[in-house]
Image: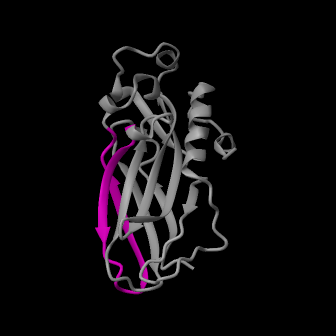
Amino acid sequence: MSAVEVLQVNVLNNPGFFRDPFCFEITYEVREALQQDIEWKVIYVSCAKDESLDQVLDEVLLPADTVGRFQFTLEVSAPNPDKIPSDDLLGITAVLITCSYKDQEFIRIGYYLNNEYDEAEMNENPPSPPLLENIRRHIFSEEPRVTHFLHSFDSPESYLDENASHPSYNSLLDTVEETQHSKLKNSDVQSSRMNFV
């Protein structure tokens, strides 16, 4: 059992436009009072092929020194389009929510998302330069991909929820790359198309 357990994440402001902020309502439980703050981070995957292009949209420290259930809303700015390769601006990518303690990540929640123009003609013949005000973003919130990592927290022994699923970050990126290559541009892409392979 983890010292901190994420119970629920609600994706707000979805669907929206590319420049709209990301907004997540997060409910978590502190099961064991910790000596230091926990760090929440939101990361946008700019390119499935190049992890170095990931954009950290924001990071927040919250206390975890009191046992109990807590809820907060994490709102972060949209990614910088200038840091996204032109071929990756549209189509399937991912946004990640991570939580760390003592600079060590213990949970990562990933969502696939699709960026497309709000007019079919623009999707068939994307304008250059891109018209960001016309790009809509749809987060596939129904099937988050949750990864738990071993963490000792304030204990000398590491432990992990035995019921947790453990797909890797690379699996997420591989699937993003696969769906990008298949040129999925429609916001009604079935969530089953984004399962790990």
Where does residue 195 sit, x and y in percent of width and height?
A: 67, 46
Q: Residue at x 54, y 50 (%)?
A: 169
Asked whether residue 117 appears in the rendered view, the answer is no
Disc tally is 0
Q: Residue at x 49, y 59 (%)?
A: 108
Is 96 above or below relative to 48? below
Q: Residue at x 30, y 36 (%)?
A: 80
Where is residue 86, by image quadrant? top left
Where does residue 190 sit, x and y in percent of width and height?
A: 66, 40
Is 85 above or below relative to 111? above
Between 61 and 105, the one lying in front of the other is 105
Is 162 above or below relative to 74? below
Between 166 and 122, the one lying in front of the other is 166
Q: Quadrant of the C terminus?
A: top right
Where does residue 49 sit, x and y in percent of width and height?
A: 50, 33
Q: Residue at x 46, y 84 (%)?
A: 155
Where does residue 79 sit, x and y in percent of width and height?
A: 34, 40
Q: Quadrant of the N terminus?
A: bottom right
Q: What range is drawn magenta here?
A: 53-79
Q: As drawn, is 176 to the left or to the right of 13?
A: right
Q: Is residue 195 magenta?
A: no
